[in-house]
Image (cartoon, rainbow, N blue to C red):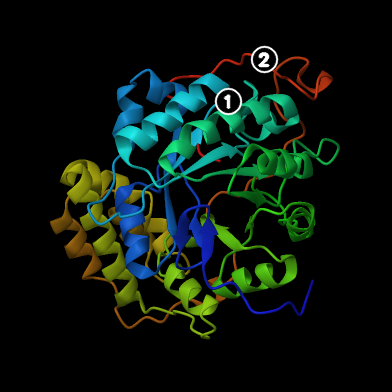
Amino acid sequence: MDGMSALPTSLTLGSLRVDVPVVLAPMAGITNAAYRRLCAEQGAGLYVCEMITSRGLVEGDQHTRDMLVFDELETTRSVQLYGTDPVYVGKAAEILCAEYGVAHIDLNFGCPVPKVTRKGGGGALPWKRGLLAEILEQAVAAATPYGVPVTMKTRKGIDDDHLTYLDAGRIAQEAGCAAIALHGRTVAQAYSGAADWDAIAALVEHVDIPVLGNGDVWEAADAIRMVEQTGAAGVVVGRGCLGRPWLFRDLAAAFRGEEVATLPTLGEVAAMMRRHAELLCQHMGEERGCKEFRKHVSWYLKGFAAGGEMRRSLGLVDSLAALDRLLAELDPSEPFPVAELGSPRGRQGSPRERVVLPEGWLDDADGSGCHLQEDASETTGG
């Protein structure tokens, strides 16, 4: 599909218009209110809250409720919901609309983590076509009176022998979903190997609703290439922005047709680190905010010459004053490590020999009316 017409400059999801066709993928322990604010300061897009469980929300689980925190400047509230029971998902969608004022709900059918798939959730669920339809229909029915669009995210399938994405796209369209996002990997691949953009193109041809492409968008140029090759209406960015929130600035520029690639010096990266930590502390308090920040250090410094002792100290930082002292020791003029451009970030791992599924899961490809076990406080992202 090379040589397609002009790039999309915005994204329409039902009643919601997003100024740039870019969505931040929910990532457990990463895309909290502070990080969403940090990314939004860099460029327009849709910034999705960490995944929450429908049952946890309906039953009033405190941990689930605590995750539903939004920044004061977060004007468009977007939440990803996980669920395996249509009734719970419908009730949770209504709570999100009525009590939390969300403007967009995304349903997670892409998570590859064994503790999720062994219960039939995440990327395993679309195998049950009837159950998938019931869940989507309940969510759409609950959100529609509030004018809130519902989308879904999925993978190609369980493995290469059990592909589900084309059926999932048809079911999403028939259920009234505003869009479907496809991660071009199977559950068995997890985060290994290369994303299959041809599958994204095939889904674009298969449905009439917008398709968002996900997988291997490490730089703004990758996003443009994906959209040109697949005809996708926009991109979903996950691991590519870890330690690089300015990627959203590059993406916004790229979709405007500007050739802008941000190559910050170490001093500019340090300033971004400080801003990130500051926002975390504002939302969580200084002690917890600094602890949360530690996991981001290695991503920010990837490829830079900062030594092991510095990295260890930053990985133990317990106050903003301590962070300031350490950041002041970095060489602010050190150029960005160009060799890191286009390289994978975050978890990769290796493909799974087998996907952990409920017993007899593959025997029935419908699953209408089936009742699955769902933890009230499951928090793993997809």
Q: Is residue 102 visible?
A: yes
**Where, by quadrant of the figure, is residue 61 drawn?**
top left
Say if 248 sits above or below 358 in the image.
below
> Which of marks 1 and 2 precedes in the sequence?
1
Which residue is label 1 attached to?
A: 115
| Secondary structure type for disc 1 | helix
Of residues 26 and 106, the one nearer the viewer is 106
Q: Position of residue 185 (x, y in %)?
A: 71, 48
Of residues 97 and 304, the one nearer the viewer is 97
Which residue is the extreme one toward the left?
321
Of residues 6 and 248, the one nearer the viewer is 6
Which residue is the extreme one toward the right?
161
Residue 131: mark in rendering = none
Say if 365 sits above or below 108 in the image.
above
Say if 33 sits above or below 86 in the image.
below
- Indicate the amino acid at tag 2: Cys
| Secondary structure type for disc 2 | loop
Q: Position of residue 111 (x, y in %)?
A: 59, 37
Residue 370: mark in rendering = 2
Q: How many C-alpha atoms fall within 10 Å of the one at disc 1: few (<14), some, or many (≥20)?
A: some
* Quarter of the picture holding the N terminus: bottom right
**Where, by quadrant of the figure, is residue 129 drawn?**
top right
Q: Position of residue 355 (x, y in %)?
A: 72, 30
Q: Residue shown at 41%/70% (left/top)? A: 246
Which residue is the extreme one toward the front?
145
